[in-house]
Image (cartoon, rainbow, N blue to C red):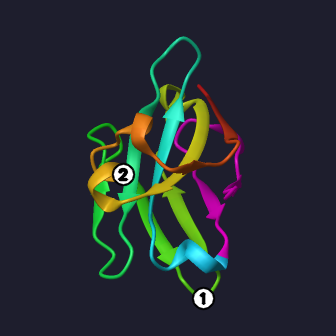
């Protein structure tokens, strides 16, 4: 069973920044696309950002464009999500998921192959 591990969550005030990290096993990381999702209480899981393997295509959800940046470091087997200008509406549990680019770029959470346990982000006003 492949396990992804998220870290970097925390509590910040509105306007602040956080960087989340997603670590994946080295045996699969370089060939796998990764996406960040988030889920707030009583809401559907929402796609935030995705990055492909290889040529590192990126895709962002409309609510985070211009504020969040996704990147990957194949040497460290990690994907980072740099979040700026955070707002209370960004409060959620953030998960990273791995799978094919055709799946993660559509933010199709039902077809993602592997998940982490999540890291909590709380933004106060």
Residue 9 lies in the magenta-colored region? yes
Residue 41 at what x, y percent from top left? 59, 16
Indicate the quadrant where residue 54 lies. Answer: bottom left
Name the N-terminal-most of marks 2 and 1. Answer: 1
- Residue drawn 62% across the image and 61% down it: 22
Residue receiving disc 1:
75
Q: Nearer the viewer, residue 123 or 76?
A: 76
Secondary structure at numbered mark 1: loop
Q: Nearer the viewer, residue 80 or 99?
A: 99
- Residue drawn 30% across the image and 49% down it: 65
Q: Which segment did they paint magenta?
A: 1-25
- Residue drawn 48% across the image and 16% down it: 43
Secondary structure at numbered mark 2: helix
Instruction: Measure how far apart labels 2 and 1 are at the Cα level.
Output: 22 Å
Indicate the quadrant where residue 59 lies. Answer: bottom left
Residue 42 lies in the magenta-colored region? no
* Residues packed near mark 1 inside 10 Å, few (<14), some (14 to 19) or many (20 plus): few
Indicate the quadrant where residue 92 lies. Answer: top right
**Relative height, residue 42 to residue 107 (above, below):** above
**Relative height, residue 119 to residue 72 (above, below):** above
Residue receiving disc 2:
104
> Left or right of 15: which side holds 76?
right
């Amino acid at each position: 069973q492949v396990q992804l591990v998220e870290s970097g969550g925390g509590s910040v005030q509105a306007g602040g920044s956080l960087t989340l990290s997603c670590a994946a096993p080295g045996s699969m990381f370089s060939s796998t696309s990764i996406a960040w999702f988030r889920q707030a209480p009583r809401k559907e899981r929402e796609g935030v950002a995705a990055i492909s393997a290889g040529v590192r295509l990126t895709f962002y959800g409309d609510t985070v464009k211009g504020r969040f940046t996704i990147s990957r470091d194949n040497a460290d087997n990690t994907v980072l999500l740099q979040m700026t200008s955070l707002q209370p509406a960004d409060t959620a549990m953030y998960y990273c998921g791995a799978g094919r680019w055709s799946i993660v770029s559509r933010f199709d959470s039902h077809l993602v192959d592997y998940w982490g346990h999540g890291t909590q982000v709380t933004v106060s006003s």
